[in-house]
Image (tube, rainbow, N blue to C red):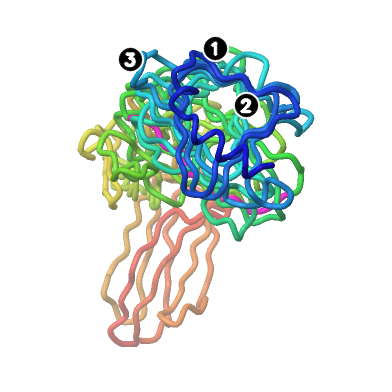
Amino acid sequence: MRTCLSILLLLFALPLAAQQDLYIAPGTRLQVAQGEALSIYGSVVNDGALGTADNAVINFFGKAWNNGMGASMPDNSQNGFSAKGGLFRFSGNNPLYGNLGAQQVFGGYSIASRLGATFPNLEVDNRLGLLLADLSDLKVRNTLHFTSGHLFLNGWNLVVGHGNPGTITGYSDQSFIITGTGIAGGFVYREQVNAAAGKIIFPIGTSISTYAPAAIEFDGAADDIRARVFDSVYQYAISGITNKLDFTNKTWNIAKTKPDAAATKLTLQHMDADEGSDYAAFRSASYVTRFANNTWDYVENPGSLPMPGNITTRGTLRNATMHLRVLQDGITTNEYFTKASVLYGPYAPAVFILFNAYRLNESFAQLDWSVNRELNNDRFEIERRFENETDFTKAGEVRSIAPNGNANIRLDYKYADPNSYDGWTYYRIKAVSRNGRVSYSEIRAVPPFLRVDVWPNPNVGQFQVRIRGQQTELFMQIVNSAGQLVNQYEIVGERTIHVSHLSKGTYVLAFYDQATRRLVRTFKVIVIDRR
């Protein structure tokens, strides 16, 4: 009977095509044989079964396709859904009635119950698009292909795959799935994604001009993964104020069914026109940020650089940028991601690798520092605190020498601070970015000026040491070239020390603060002979 119906349908293709609509009644099964093609020019209401063998093609030129509660579109396998099946092509150029505009499909499937009609393969070939009708999801068991136009979810869901992720082909920045601009809307589901499935593409966007696809490589046990993207980046993912400066204007909502943790590689792509002004200026230092612990997380070292967008079947896009983030703990049952420039997070305007401060003479302290990275840096402020003070105050500043405040190489700076204070002075360097971010060096202590006179020097093992200018108790150590302590002297107030009986060699006089044990000054002495 199935074969007879197939032959009958094909024999009367032209009269059927001339009818405005096609209705398949409950209990009726029509079948298109392998390699055959059937064109339908009016709308379809399917309450029965419309079967297709492998490589059969149904060209649908009508305005609307409606699958009823009992509808099915089986393939020629025994169970009706395990073979390849035919292709249902939705085309906007109706040879009989002209271009009817965007088409509409009531899929007759429910993602909530996992029941209903499913297409074996579906092609979108309508430059004005294919729209999901209200109150129904759409499922494609094997392959969804784009030739032209977009698939509008219209608040409903699309499922691709049947016990596996299925395949989506032909997608590009000109043809993709539109999930909508709002925070709520339909998802694209890919069934039973696992490590063996490789990279699974979600060719999605928020409007016909804003392609923002995602790609997922999932190392866990098979699970259904869904994704959508919407406009704006909210402070709390889906609420709060929006940030139009430091982010792309896109938020990706990605989730899976099971809470199991498994390493996941997430690739997100956006059109450069969607970038905020601060983001665009620092695109090279941007990253995928995840909403976690009630905030967008900060990734100082993303591990990979932004790349030209190549989530497309039509060649790399020059006006799109792609980012990869590796999530070792995987994704949970509901996650939000976006892209931020490093300016958004608590970034360091400068990364300090060296800072030295020392007494240059009675009137100046010398500060030397080095950095190995500057980001949007404007200046370095020298902050100083005398030992009788509680707070640091600004003592001077040095402008950044990095081009536009950005550098990834070592840069060296120095500053001589007028300082004749007769006690200890504490210094730190504050890097200040152009938008007010700051980072600090370590704190260094500079002692008061200590005048040390040694005579004669060089000598023959006997000399005198006169110490003046100290305000605290000191002790002096004499250390030989082997690092051995030869002698030690207490110093209170101004004092002259007589040293004798030293052997030939080079010695260091090291002066320490008695209370803090900090080194105040060193002085080299040379004994050329011993008398």
Q: What crowding class fits label 1: few (fewer than 14 Cα within 10 Å), some (14-19), or many (20 or more)? A: few
Image position of 476 with respect to 451: above or below: below
Q: Residue at x 70, y 30 (%)?
A: 28
Find out whether residue 451 is within the magenta segment: no
> In the rendered structure, which amino acid carries the disc numbered 1?
Ile
| Alpha-carbon span between mark 2 and mark 3 | 30 Å
Percent coordinates x, y for residue 503 in the rendering: 39, 86
Q: Which mark is residue 342?
A: none
Q: Secondary structure at mark 1?
A: loop
Image quarter (top left, top right, bottom left or bottom right) of the C terminus: bottom left
Task: Please indicate, yes or no, whether residue 4 appears anywhere in the rendered image.
Answer: yes
Q: Residue at x 64, y 41 (%)?
A: 225
> In the rendered structure, which amino acid carries the disc numbered 3?
Gly
The residue singled out by tag 1 in the image is 241
Q: Are marks 3 and 1 in contact (CB under 8 Å)?
A: no
The residue singled out by tag 3 in the image is 98
Percent coordinates x, y for residue 312 in the rendering: 37, 42
Find out whether residue 270 is within the magenta segment: yes
Q: Sequence order check: which comes first, mark 2 or mark 3?
A: 3
Foreground: 88 or 132? 88
Image quarter (top left, top right, bottom left or bottom right) of the N terminus: top right
Q: Which mark is residue 157?
A: 2
Q: Sequence order check: which comes first, mark 3 or mark 1?
A: 3
Percent coordinates x, y for residue 124 in the rendering: 44, 31
Residue 129 occupies quadrant: top left
Q: Sequence order check: which comes first, mark 1 or mark 2?
A: 2
> In the rendered structure, which amino acid carries the disc numbered 2?
Asn
Image position of 488 with respect to 223: above or below: below
Report the mark closest to the observer, 1 or 2: 2
| Highlighted range, magenta | 261-271
Image position of 508 with respect to 40: above or below: below
